[in-house]
Amino acid sequence: MKYAAIAVLSALLALPGAAAAQLGGEPIIHDPSTIALSDGKYYTFGTGRGGLVSEDGWTWHSGGVRPGGGVAPDIIHIGDRYYVAYAVGGGGMNGGHASQIKVMWTHSLDPSSPAFGYHEVGVVAESNGIEDADAIDPAFLLADGRLWLSYGTYFGYIRMVELDPATGARRAGNQPVDIAIDMEATALLYRDGYYYLLGTHGTCCDGPNSSYNIRVGRSRSPTGPFVDHMGVPLLKGGGKLVVAGRGRRYGAGHFGLVDLGDGLEKFSMHYEADMDRSGRSVLAIEPLLWKDGWPVGGENLAAGTYEIESQRSGGALELAVDDTRIAFDARRSFFAPPNTPVSPIANQTLGEDQASWPSGPIKVDLGDYMIRPHQQWTVTPVAGAGGYFGAPYYSIVIAGTGRALAVSGDTVTTVPTFTDAPEQLWRIDQLTDGTYRITPKVTGQGPSRALIAVGASTPALAPFDPASVVGRWAFKRP
């Protein structure tokens, strides 16, 4: 019954337009800040006084304390301080665009910590309601030892100011610089000598009728000029698409980078409406890819059946069993006259392939992909098993069976039946180049042992090396 339920879920999630499993718990939030790790827990704050907290980055609940209320906060961790910026007023609320952006700091985001307690820094940017700017939606960036803050909305310009990383206060004499128009909810990245300005285009705050989408431009200077991939300045409304709504989630906005190291980057945002959660605004965490020097939204692996291909050898992950030939007369095929009638030949069935398999554990290896059943893996998010930082734990089983990929000590094998045991659960994280890292749950949250290819034919567990292809895999539809 358990395996049947997994198969049904896999079939449903593999339908066109379906997306991978989303976060657990109650990830209800609007305008989430960049996620920060503090005292072993993850925190994000949204518009209003509330926020979310998680121990694993997958299951989120209400929690966290942030005084001041206001709109669209952001967090950055510098040294022993967590700086929090937020806007008070503006955004057209009550008909006005007069606003102030304030900064405060604390040594911990955990209210139960003795190091918890906010200290006011003061106002770092403001708008008077008449000028062509609205001081809301702040976003931090620390790059080359300098601290920057972008802010603004559709009312006028997006602006940039410089802050002091030692205090969080505005640099004396620093004046705001106009850097973009026609966006809000900005975010900043720095990579390979480029400053990236991400902003949300479209409409918000209207549930599934919101057209929010995240776009980006870049510059060699933190104060611009920022242009998109077509050379259109962001001061003229340009912006390359990073991510938009998908599946049953509408209106992607409020980007926040989370760099997990080892070539694994993710980003947080909210969807304006999750149709599976009554159209509420929800937190989402998805992989971040880089293509031709530009950030692109990735996605968690959707349930389905795949060939799992090693990027080292090109070999397919498979059961280490003897190959069963498909009945075929090659000579008759080669020498048949051209006008001989043709008809379809069936692929090898599971029953034909499975007849010679041992009944107990079966080792795995890498082989030439022959479209055989023992090379087809059904991958499914496991309900109730949790996950880790935006990705669920998955089962990986031979399609049409319960035979599951599992860890046995320091080796990888398969067991006859999937049982939800931790050694049968896997993290599958998309890396910045679009390939995937496969990590057993039993590794925990510390330094990871990942599935790697030793030579051309041997899968094994070893520490993941981001500079090597041996731990990178592609999931391809059969």
Image (cartoon, rainbow, N blue to C red):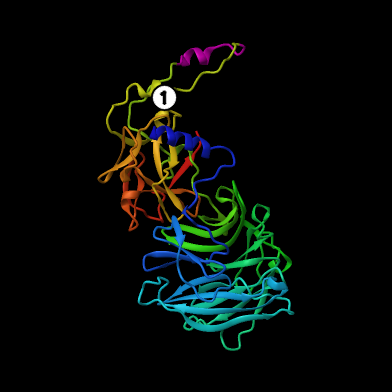
Secondary structure at badge 1 equals helix
> Residue 440: percent from the left, percent from the top?
35, 48
Taking 366 as reference, is 160 left or right?
A: right
Which residue is disc 1 drawn over?
A: 350
- Using the image, determine if residue 333 lies above or below residue 283: above
Q: Give neighbour class at mark 1: few <14, some 14-19, many 20+ (Cα, 10 Å).
A: some
Furthest residue toward bottom: 172
The number of discs equals 1
Pick whichever, 39 or 117, lies toward us.
117
Pick whichever, 296 or 56, lies toward us.
56
Residue pictured at 54% horizontal, 73% vertical: 140
- Using the image, determine if residue 385 lies above or below residue 173: above
Residues shaded magenta: 328-339
Taking 251 as reference, is 141 left or right?
A: left
Residue pictured at 70% horizontal, 63% vertical: 238
Which quarter of the rendering shows the N terminus? Answer: top left
